Amino acid sequence: NRTGFAVGLQGQVIEGNAIVNLFSDGAIVGLVLWALWISRGHLKRVWQQVISPPEGGQISETVILRPRTALIVLGASIVFLILWLHGIGFQLHYAAFWTVLFLTGIFAAMKFLAASGFAYIYPFWDRTAERVTIDILGTRGMRESTMVGLKMVNFRTIAGWRVPHTLPHLERIRGTGHGLIPLVVGSLIVGIVVSGLYTIWLCYLEGGANLDNW
C-alpha cells in the first residue's frame, strides 16, 4: 500500500493482505520443496525398499508401516481424495491441484511439529487451497459445481486432517514400551465416531448452514 506495488490485472488487483497471503503460501511451498530435496537420499532408499522389501536384519527406512505398504496407503488415499472431490463437483484437474495444496499444508505442519514439539500447529489449508487454486488456475474455465465445491470443502468437512500431525510422535510413543499405541488408536476411533455422531446431531438440531458458528 505504501509503495504502490500491485498484483493482478488492471481493474482487479489484489490488496496488501492478499499479497502477504500469496507470499506466505509461496514460502510454505518453498519450505516443502526444500524438505523433499534434502531428504532425497532417504526417499531414494525408501523406493529401493519398495522394489526390494527389507529382509532379515535390514533396517526399514519407514517406521510405522513397511515401505511398500506406506506407498500403497499414500497412493490410495490421494486417489480417494481426488475422486471424492470430483464426486462433490470439482473438475478433475482442480481436484488434483487442490489435493496437492492440501498435502503441502499438511506436510509443512508435520515438519514444524516434528521440529518444535509444539502440539497446536496446523495449516490453514482450506482457505489457502481455495485461494491459490483460484489464483493459479483461474475461474474462466471453472464450472459452477467447482466453485460451489471450493466453498463446501473446509477444515470442518475433512475432520481427519489433524491425524497426520501426530504421526511424527507415534514412534516415540511406541518406543516407550508401555502399550500406549492401542490406547491412542482406540481413543482416536472413539473420538472420530463421537465427533461424527455429534455433528450429525447438530445438523438435525440447528441446520447444517449454522455449523460455521455453532
Image (cartoon, rainbow, N blue to C red):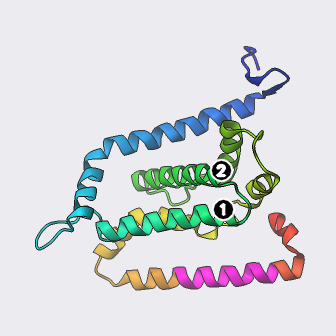
Q: Is residue 199 magenta?
A: yes
Q: Are marks 1 and 2 in contact (CB under 8 Å)?
A: yes
Question: Residue 55, position in %: x, y?
Answer: 14, 72
Numbered disc 2: secondary structure: helix
* Res. 8 visible in picture: yes
At x 75%, y 16%, the residue is 2
Give the magenta range: 188-202
Quadrant containing the N terminus in the rendered view: top right
At x 63%, y 84%, the residue is 193
* Res. 166 visible in picture: no
Q: Return the residue at label 1.
A: 85
How far is disc 1 from disc 2 in space, using C-alphas?
A: 9 Å
Say whether residue 147 is left or right of residue 164. right
Numbered disc 1: secondary structure: helix
Question: Residue 113, position in %: x, y?
Answer: 46, 55
Q: Return the residue at label 2.
A: 94
At x 11%, y 74%, the residue is 56
Name above or below for residue 23 compared with residue 9: below
Name above or below for residue 82 compared with residue 40: below
Quadrant containing the C terminus in the rendered view: bottom right
Say whether residue 179 is left or right of residue 106. left
Q: Name the amino acid, label 1.
A: Leu
Q: Earlier in the sequence, mark 1 or mark 2?
A: 1
Q: Who is closer to the viewer here, 39 or 91? A: 91
